[in-house]
Image (tube, rainbow, N blue to C red):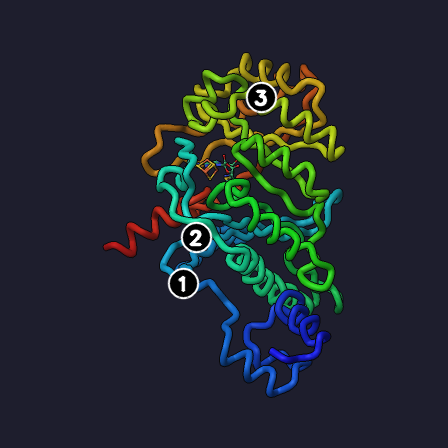
């Protein structure tokens, strides 16, 4: 646009650090430059069409309409400091509209694939959450609950919304680099988690990216027979090959791997299955997150009781595998992957 080079840094800072909503408020830029930006471009790619907050106010969820009408979901989860860890605000973002992988317990998987999100659409979700988070921090400063200068914003990002991040590989990696940029949102790589259904070639590629992010693998079963019942992808990338790829990833990155294990009542939650999982993961630097399923509208699955989840955890412990039973967040607002879109379509259609 014929502007001096330093203008691009100023623009970048306004967009990704100050999360400005309009070109007009970018006071570091000259007036004529702001005017031509306004004429040629728009900032946001997302239009909020529905928003819900859980009754305990820790979780909120937005449904956004993209410029071609597709609907995606973004969630923000607020965690109080627990002595070990500081206060956190985690944005849970989508990478695709829909998903092609068809896991049977997942509302997004049951809706089919629509399209990949652009880098801008992925990053814009964090920007929206950052605006909310900053406003909340400022409110707390005004209310005396925080000291001045303590504007923290979004502290963590998890790629656990709609879609499979590694099936939209290039845009996911570019988005991570934008989120991580020190002149912008400045979200530390160690505070970013990518969750994958287990696409082996992309996991190996990711190991070579030299990113210090966390990788979470959606395993959900200790053997092929059980896994193939709920996850069609297992026919393409069976359990042993997936774990083999995880060993390679861990050796290359020296990073601990997280395994997600959605507990489905009487399907994958027996003590024998816990022990089998313990043997499978033995020798891998990892942590298992046990997540009682969020039942979907048409799904046949029920939640595992907490007592059964705890004994599953005991089974893993016998093999030295650390695990956490994940606190539920946002159950009352359909915060599970794809569940708001499912509900919203019913509402919008009626
Ligand atoms: N496609 C990626 C990331 C999005 S899903 C993946 O599958 O990993 C994020 C996580 O939510 C995954 O671990 C997924 O298995 C889990 N999930 C999907 N549906 C769920 C449900 N109904 N209840 C609990 N977790 C669910
Ligand atoms: Fe897709 Fe992940 Fe849902 Fe499976 S769990 S259908 S991979 S979004």
Precedes in sequence: disc 3 or disc 1: 1
| Sequence order check, earlier mark of 2 and 1 | 1
Q: Quadrant of the N terminus?
A: bottom right
Q: Which residue is mark 2?
A: 72
Q: Answer yes or no: is residue 211 visible.
A: yes
The span from disc 3 to disc 2 (Cα, nearest Å) is 32 Å
- Quadrant for residue 83, please give it: top right
- Residue behind mark 1: 67
Q: Position of residue 217 (x, y in %)?
A: 58, 32
- The crowd level at tag 1 (other Cα within 10 Å; few <14, some 14-19, many 20+) is few
- Relative to residue 106, is residue 89 drawn left or right? right
User: Which of the two discs, 2 and 1, sits closer to the camera?
Assistant: 1
Q: Secondary structure at mark 3?
A: helix
Residue 31 in the image: state x and y as whole percent.
Answer: 61, 87
Q: Where residue 77 sits in the image (x, y, percent)?
A: 57, 50
What residue is rendered at 55% in x and 36% in y? 196
């Amino acid at each position: 646009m014929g502007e001096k080079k330093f203008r691009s840094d100023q623009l970048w800072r306004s967009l990704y650090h100050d999360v400005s909503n309009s070109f007009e408020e970018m006071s570091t830029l000259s007036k004529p430059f702001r005017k031509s930006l306004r004429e040629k471009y728009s900032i946001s790619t997302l239009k909020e069409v529905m928003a819900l907050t859980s009754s305990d106010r820790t979780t909120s969820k937005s449904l956004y309409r993209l410029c071609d009408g597709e609907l995606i979901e973004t969630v923000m989860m607020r965690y109080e400091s627990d002595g070990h860890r500081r206060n956190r605000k985690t944005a849970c973002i989508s990478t695709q509209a829909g998903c092609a992988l068809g896991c049977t317990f997942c509302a997004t998987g049951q809706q089919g694939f629509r399209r990949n999100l652009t880098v801008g659409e992925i990053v814009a979700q964090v920007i929206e959450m950052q605006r909310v988070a900053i406003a909340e921090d400022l409110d707390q400063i005004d209310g005396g609950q925080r000291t001045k200068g303590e504007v923290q914003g979004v502290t963590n990002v998890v790629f656990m919304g709609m879609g499979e991040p590694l099936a939209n590989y290039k845009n996911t990696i570019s988005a991570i680099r934008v989120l991580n940029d020190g002149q912008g949102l400045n979200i530390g790589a160690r505070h970013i988690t990518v969750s994958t259904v287990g696409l082996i070639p992309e996991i190996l590629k990711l190991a070579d990216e030299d990113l210090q992010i966390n990788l979470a693998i959606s395993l959900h079963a200790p053997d092929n027979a059980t896994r193939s019942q709920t996850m069609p992808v297992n026919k393409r990338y069976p359990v042993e090959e997936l774990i083999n790829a995880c060993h390679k990833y861990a050796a290359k990155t020296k990073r601990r791997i997280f395994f997600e294990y959605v507990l489905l009542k009487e399907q994958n939650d027996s003590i024998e299955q816990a022990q089998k999982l313990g043997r499978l993961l033995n020798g891998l630097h990892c942590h298992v997150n046990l997540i009682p399923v969020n039942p979907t509208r048409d799904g046949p699955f029920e939640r595992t009781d907490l007592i059964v989840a705890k004994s599953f955890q005991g089974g893993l412990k016998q093999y030295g595998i650390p695990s956490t039973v994940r606190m539920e967040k946002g159950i009352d607002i359909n915060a599970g992957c794809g569940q708001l879109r499912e509900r919203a379509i019913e509402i919008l259609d009626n």
